[in-house]
Amino acid sequence: MELHVTPALTLLREHHLLDHTKNLTDFTATSVAYDSRKVTAGTLFFCKGNFLPKYLTMAKEQGAVAYVAEQEYSEGGDLPAIIVTDEQKAMALLGAAFYGFPQDELTIIAITGTKGKTTTAYMADHVLGRATDHHVALFSTLDRVLGNGPDDRFKSDLTTPESLDLFHDMRAAVDNGMTHLVMEVSSQAYKKYRTYGLHFDIGIFLNISPDHIGRNEHPTFADYLHCKEQLLVNSRVCLINAETADLADVYYTAKATTQPEDIYLFARHGAQVQLPEGAAIDFEYRNDLEDLHESEFELAACTPNAERLGLQRRYKTSVPGDYNEGNAVAAIISTALAGATAKDAVATLDHVHIKGRMEMQKTRQHGTIYIDYAHNYASLKRLLAFLKRQTAAGKVTVVLGATGDKGISRRQGFGKALSEEHPDRIILTTDDPGFEDPMKIAQEINSHIDHDQVGEIQYIMDRPTAIKAAIDSSGNGDIVVLAGKGEDPYQKINGVDTPYETDSKIAADYIHKIED
């Protein structure tokens, strides 16, 4: 991989990003980096994010051939400089060019939504895996999968990685023979231009509800919605859950850049949907069976445009929860648009397993433990409502906390969901507190709980101790819900990813200890 300065400058000019240059030479970059620790001889270095001028000194000493920034730095000395009006946009464009525009060699399904992205991504990955003989890459909140080798799968650090990492991984996937990519796209990816200039074959909009609104994320819900909608603006074909809030805004955003015949809407049969003018439901699904292990539903095509995909039939999914049926429908339709068939979906959806999503651990004397990533109002409420409906549970204990430094609105949302679903016991604990005091976060959640609607509330800031206390106090017929962390093996504390055994392992080990 390499990037010559002349086409780089041309690309920046085409996007009106080039401000000026300094000490420019006729160079060819043989690597790109935004982390000074990764600079080697021949690197084009990007001064981004939490950049400090001393990093540029380090990059120069390690062999950088030039730097890209929004201003000149004296620390750069005589090092060639490309000064741009928006460094994040410039990095995305030049990163794609350096890696040879790998997106052009992949059929890409991109997914956004407040909840359900990861479940939909894993379902789509399984279906396309069968359709393409396992030539599918996956970029998700949980995992990054670049190929079929043992070293091609690793834990994700961001739902949507920084642009240089994103295009690097796309190139690796292509070089590994992958022909398709399923990826989650976060609102922050658009807020911070990680996907600037990137276009998708199929874009899925699952839902929208207040989340990621706070001092370090989106200032308002309108900004959050706008960023989510950019996925549709940049997709050739759009698939929208018609039950989403703000449907008219979402639909008209898609219609602004997409032909009506390339916009598909789906909804549950009987759902109260107010369709925008000119829109029609293309697919309806009807629930036939649901329990704690699987669900079955019938998918019907309602328009000629939908009928041509040949998806009308019954499906079974192994991911429980009636609320996950919509995610399955999105996966079925999107993968069909990418070349899969109904047979591929039928053959795979009934054995999809997603770590940290509705995992169940049965005990002999302490009820049933459910581990789920539910991390905002909508997902927590739907999880608790489903479990209560399905289990005829005795006492319900919920263990949860909220993240620090981001998603501030989740704290109020948790209080609201808990008040509406009436658990018997709530243990407030730590969940990625960042630079905040976890006790203050827990107290803020508690301030939003209607105490007349719930049972006992307890603070236990050590999360493993909280999990063990919840299990200890539960008996046969009771349920314990461990919400928010799923299979995350780290706690983000004071800027450090601190190893954490995961809720699943802590619960399983403790059950083994007290019952064996």
Image (cartoon, rainbow, N blue to C red):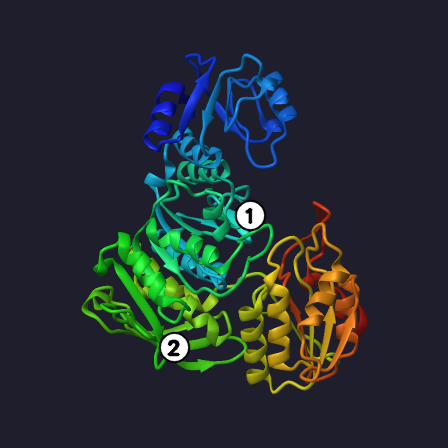
424 over 215 or under it: above or below = below
Instruction: Indicate left or right for 343 with 450 as reference.
Output: left
Quadrant (top left/top right/bottom left/bottom right) for the C terminus: bottom right
Residue under pointer 2: 297
Q: Is residue 17 visible?
A: yes
443 over 128 or under it: above or below = below
Task: Estimate the x, y position of residue 474 in percent, counting from the top left.
Answer: 75, 80
Q: Residues within 10 Å of mark 2 (few under 14, many from 20)?
A: many
Q: Secondary structure at mark 2?
A: strand
Identify the residue at the far left of this view.
Answer: 304
Amino acid type shown at disc 1:
Leu
Name the image quarter holding residue 363. Answer: bottom right
Q: Secondary structure at mark 1?
A: loop
Name the image quarter holding residue 281. Answer: bottom left
Task: Estimate the x, y position of residue 481 in percent, counting from the top left.
Answer: 66, 73
Q: Residues within 10 Å of mark 1 (few under 14, many from 20)?
A: some
**Relative depth, front residue between 124 and 94:** 94
Residue under pointer 1: 158
Task: Estimate the x, y position of residue 6 in percent, counting from the top left.
Answer: 36, 19
**Relative depth, front residue between 252 and 265:** 252
Amino acid type shown at disc 2:
Phe
Name the image quarter holding residue 207. Answer: bottom left
| Residue for point 60% across, 23% down | 56
Alpha-carbon span between mark 1 and mark 2: 33 Å
**Relative depth, front residue between 79 and 480:** 79
Disc assigned to residue 144: none
| Residue for point 47% across, 73% down | 323
